Amino acid sequence: MAVAGPIVRWWGRLEVEGLDTLPMRGAVILPANHDSAWDPVVIAFAARRRRQIQALAKASLWKNPLLRRVLDGMGQIPVRRGEADMDALDAAVQCLSAGGCLGIFPEGSRSQGRQLRARSGVGRLAQSVPEARIVCAAVSGTVDIARFPRRPRLKVTFFEPTPSSPSESALKLAVRLTAELRAVAPVAVAGRPE
């Protein structure tokens, strides 16, 4: 965060809305949209005064020994993509059961300019830990961070989604959350003006 701070705050001109929506304690599931590798850093920086976010991150990131130390130090949870990773789900449930704040990308991967389908993981977590609050984090501007000399305008909007009904399936919840996130932060394509 110390290294990324000046990039996010100064270069990115970060604007944060709805931070008071994020509870300072208690179990929170924090679904977010995902257009850039910078998204988790920007969201974590935006939330830093209220919560430390543990997140599900692709397991391949742990192959880099330096990055592995950073991720482990931050309490991130490796998930094997493309399969039902029950170890990651169990670790995420443990995080939430202990009152943690868990970040997750319902789309499962960076959009790379395409509309992706939602994955059921966020819905399964909500069903497994029903006392957890859901607060969405819509992030925009991150695809422009590397467009030097043009400065990006980063924005993170925290908001509570529409309440779910008891009959809503895990997948339907994930689809709805993704739609609500994308209504605030539409899919962005790197290198193109908005």
Image (cartoon, grey):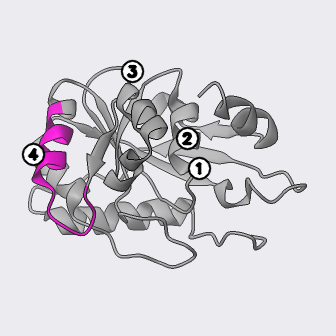
Q: Residue 132: horizontal and vertical position, in percent?
A: 21, 36
Disc 1: which residue: 38
- Residue holding disc 4: 128
Residue 82 in the magenta stretch? The answer is yes
Q: Amino acid at mark 1?
A: Trp
Q: Quadrant of the N terminus?
A: top right
Callout 1: helix, strand or loop? loop
Please provide the residue range marked out in magenta: 80-94
Q: Main secondary structure of the magenta part?
A: helix
Which quadrant of the rendered structure holds the C terminus? bottom right
Q: Is residue 188 left or right of residue 152?
A: left
Q: Which residue is mark 2?
A: 41
Above/below status of 113 relative to 60: below
Q: Earlier in the sequence, mark 4 or mark 3?
A: 3
Pointer 3 residue: 24
The residues tagged by marks 2 and 4 sit, at their Cα atoms, a distance apart of: 27 Å
